[in-house]
Image (spheres, rainbow, N blue to C red):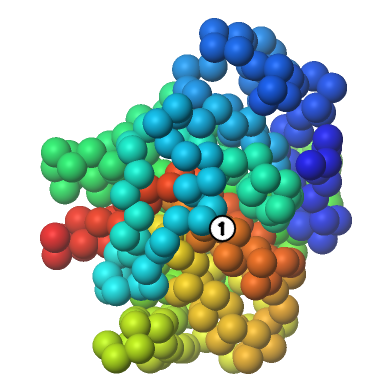
Amino acid sequence: MATELQCPDSMPCHNQQVNSASTPSPEQLRPGDPILDHAGGNRASRAKVTLLTGHTHCSLPAELDAGACVGSSLNSESNSGSGDSSSYDAPAGNSFLGDCELSRQIGAQLKLLPMNDQIRELQTIIRDKTASRGDFMFSADRLIRLVVEEGLNQLPYKECMVTTPTGYKYEGVKFEKGNCGVSIMRSGEAMEQGLRDCCRSIRIGKILIQSDEETQRAKVYYAKFPPDIYRRKVLLMYPILSTGNTVIEAVKVLIEHGVQPSVIILLSLFSTPHGAKSIIQEFPEITILTTEVHPVAPTHFGQKYFGTD
């Protein structure tokens, strides 16, 4: 694994990066050892693993096979609107990004929001089966907003000069034009409002992909995009990545419409190691942004968010 991951110039990443020189390797860590946080400070980690932007330090639970998250048997999507469904049932423990081999294989294309107690609480409420639908939706919308904000941070800016009411010249930045959103129906539609709250006039396309009843393979049933999507950078929205099959089919449709994978930023809330790896292997230039990589994804998301559970 590279000691320092660099973001492409066309998609600058403003997240804090950490050198391996200042961060102990997984083999050097022992239970109770402090782990360097994202800002370079020194604090005790509350989880078994600290997730860094582009870096992963793994501490697998003893009862979980280290290879299970990569080689587990995962079904294709059969749960309409809830994200990729999975038959994999692993112990529900703290978050971790598969094993370190997976991290080396995926690299900088997978970006994780810097973990903090606020994000951890939102993840906990979303995963809690006893949470009310009101609490679930409130927490989901907050987490979606955080992911969308960071997704916008991956888009290119350009410098500009404005004049303040007092006549002061201020050097700032503004978005470069040519962005759009695409939601994968149905669960991806839950993220549309969060994007519109940040970009009021942004255009949003839609893709409907469901599992074929006979073959159980993902099949595209509907797709509608802005006519000039081939010239735009695309924020692809899908909250739960389990197998990755649905997203792979969606990206294929975008490519058929002239979109290059290098300008696609996939926004998700939760991902399994298998799902992230499958997408990156199929499209090495795509960027995935998520809050957590864990072998158990909350595939009930769509049903509970839209009240069909």
The image shows residue 103, relative to residue 77, as above or below, that is: above
Q: Amino acid at mark 1?
A: Ala
**Residue 192: image x %, image y %?**
41, 64
Query: Within the image, what quadrant is residue 118 found in?
Result: top left
Q: Residue at x 47, y 52 (%)?
A: 272
Residue in front for this viewpoint, 255 or 65: 65
**Residue 225: image x %, image y %?**
52, 86
Give the residue number, with chain letter if any, for mark 1.
276
**Residue 220: image x %, image y %?**
43, 88
Total labels drawn = 1
Image quarter where the C terminus lies is bottom left
Q: Secondary structure at mark 1?
A: helix
> In the rendered view, does 60 fall on the left or right side of 99?
left
- For label 1, the crowd category at 10 Å Cα-Cα, with few meaning under 14, some 14 to 19 and many 20 or more, is many
Residue 145 visible: no
Residue 110 visible: yes
**Residue 113: image x %, image y %?**
57, 40
Residue in front for this viewpoint, 19 or 234: 19
Q: Residue at x 18, y 42 (%)?
A: 129
